[in-house]
Image (tube, helix red, strand yellow):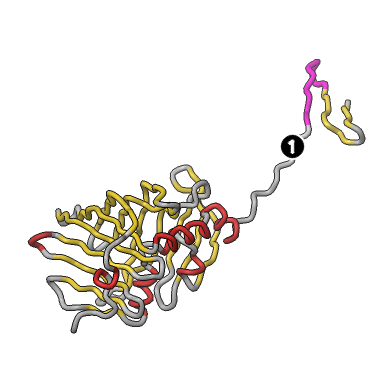
Amino acid sequence: MFELAGDRVESMKLLQDGQEMVLTRAKSTKPAPAIDLAAIDRVRRSARAEAAMAKMGALIGRGTVRLPQSGVEGSLTIVATADGRAMSQMDFGEIGRIRDVLAQDTAWMDASFSPLDVYRGKFLDQARAGHPLALFGDWSRWFSDVSVLGSTERDGRSLWRVRVGRGEAPPVEVLVDPKTGDPVETRGVKFVRLGGGIPITVRYTDFRSVKGVRLPHRIESEDEPTGRSIITIDRWERFTGDLAETIPATPPAE
């Protein structure tokens, strides 16, 4: 026997071996919403993040960096500007220091234990793609190529997969939390001077809002040659120092 709601069949009763069973109409399920960049941007609030970055002008993060494989630990300072400049310095005391500078028109690494390395071509593109704020702002501004790859499951949760790239730099796959919009992991290849490129995975956790921008306070990267490196940022805040001195326009004499 059928039960109708208007001209629509809502259920059906069956009698079998003296038992009555009611079969109800299954509710239709809506197809999962399509994943596109516009939808991801809305969750990420990328326009709001860009506006917050522009308002601050520059940020500074201070913390520590630890290399478990070699048993080394040091202090870390990062300065990043909304217009694309950056400086990061790792100080390991007697072992030495490493400073990476990304200026408006050039970039370089200046270490106390190795010659000056000025980045050009694909290495310069890689430095720009790796700007400390690039993953947390409007990707269309920081990258020349952005495409949605789909979704994946990780540790019982669904994540969006997005590929970003800039110029000659190797593309990077970004895993995005669809609830918060946070980029929680990247996978790609890093160009090195000797040996071409090495696979590298970076995980971002402990996100906190900094003046309207969600930034990670723990960054863990891993590659085969160096093992893991763990960065812990104690605090991000607006930078009020001398940018021209902190991020010089040109490298020191080679």
Q: Residue at x 46, y 55 (%)?
A: 175
Magenta stretch in the rendered image: 15-24
- Which quarter of the rendered picture does the C terminus lie within? bottom left
Seen from this angle, which residue lies furthest bottom? 254
Q: Nearer the viewer, residue 128 or 83?
A: 83
* Residue beneath disc 1: 27
Q: Position of residue 69 (x, y in %)?
A: 19, 55
Q: Quadrant of residue 57?
A: bottom left
Q: Position of residue 225 (x, y in %)?
A: 24, 64
**Is 19 contained in the magenta span?**
yes
Q: Nearer the viewer, residue 228 or 209?
A: 209
Seen from this angle, which residue lies furthest right? 7
Residue count near mark 1 (Cα–Cα under 10 Å), binned few <14, some 14–19, many ≥20:
few
The amino acid sitting under disc 1 is Lys
Seen from this angle, which residue lies furthest left? 94
Q: Is residue 8 shown above or below 155?
A: above
Q: In the drawing, does residue 35 fall left or right of residue 198?
A: right
**Is 207 contained in the magenta span?**
no
Q: In the drawing, does residue 205 fall left or right of residue 28?
A: left
Q: In the drawing, does residue 243 fall left or right of residue 133?
A: left
Q: Mark 1 falls on what kind of element?
A: loop
Predominant SS along the magenta part: strand
Q: Is residue 246 shown above or below 77?
A: below
Q: Position of residue 56 (x, y in %)?
A: 40, 60
- Which quarter of the rendered picture does the N terminus lie within? top right
Q: Quadrant of residue 224?
A: bottom left
Q: Is residue 106 shown above or below 131?
A: below
